[in-house]
Amino acid sequence: MTAIRYVDLADARPDEAVVVIDVLRAFTVEPWLFHRGAARLLAVDTLDGAVALRDEYLPHALLAGEQGGAPVAGFDLGNSPSEVAGQDLTDATVVHRTSAGTQGLARTIGSGLVLAASFVTAAATARRLRSAAPARISFVITGASLGRDGDEDLAAAELIAARVLGHDPDPVPFLDRVPVSDAGRYFGPGGPDWAPEADLRLSLEVDRFDHTLVATPSKELDAVEIALG
């Protein structure tokens, strides 16, 4: 039987198979980037690295991401699925940097398999893991950083893990944990401008996309390539 373990961002390391979870919002945003037409997606762990990648190698790339949740001055897009859902990104190259999700990717590259995931890709992620049949899977709960409980990410990880192990639980109890998590509370009434309630709704669309996000090291750039799988 596949061994499952859950680790927070501080303990993220390469493993046989790794699933980096970020429900709010990096890995809800990334499927939307592809859905809106992006042709290439690169993840990085620093703001300076994102800018340097564009300025030195990819002059037409769009920069997307956040710092402390808020959009970054000079970036083309924030880290908001509702914002991305309204964009025409046909054939765009996007460089994505966030405070949690892309950090987890940077720390686990070198694994046999790295998937980025959230509720919107849960079924496809579980299916890919069952096909790969690793002896061990590490789920990186990126929301358990910056003093937050990360329960929105743990809920998604536990749903995916249950499906990998052949179970078919009702997703509603897992989804119900998201709005009351530390991160989820930002997206309620009276939250900051960068945390619209629409982002929370889109993040709860379980199995919205029928594909995985596969992360591999870029062969020529200091970045992680994200591809549909």
Image (cartoon, helix red, strand yellow):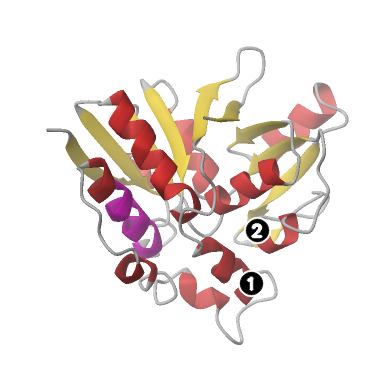
The amino acid type found where label 1 is placed reads: Ala
Q: Position of 44 compared to 193: left or right?
A: left
> To which residue does mark 1 refer?
198
The amino acid type found where label 2 is placed reads: Pro
Residue 80 vertical position relative to residue 117 in the rendered view, above or below: below
Asked if the residues shown at circle 1 and circle 2 are in contact, with their CB atoms under 8 angstroms apart, the answer is yes
Residue at image location 19% in from the left, 26% down from the top: 135
- Who is closer to the viewer here, 122 or 222? 122
Quick check: can you spot residue 210? yes
Identify the residue at the far left of this view: 1
Secondary structure of the residue carrying numbered label 2: helix
Give the x, y percent position of residue 96.
66, 41
Q: Position of 39 compared to 46: left or right?
A: right
Displayed quadrant of residue 56: top right
> To which residue does mark 2 refer?
81
Residue at image location 50% in from the left, 30% down from the top: 214
Q: Which residues are magenta?
A: 151-160
- Does the stretch in magenta take in 85? no
Secondary structure of the residue carrying numbered label 1: helix
Displayed quadrant of residue 39: top right
Residue at image location 44% in from the left, 35% down from the top: 115
Residue 182 vertical position relative to residue 28 in the rendered view, above or below: below
Which quadrant holds the N terminus?
top left
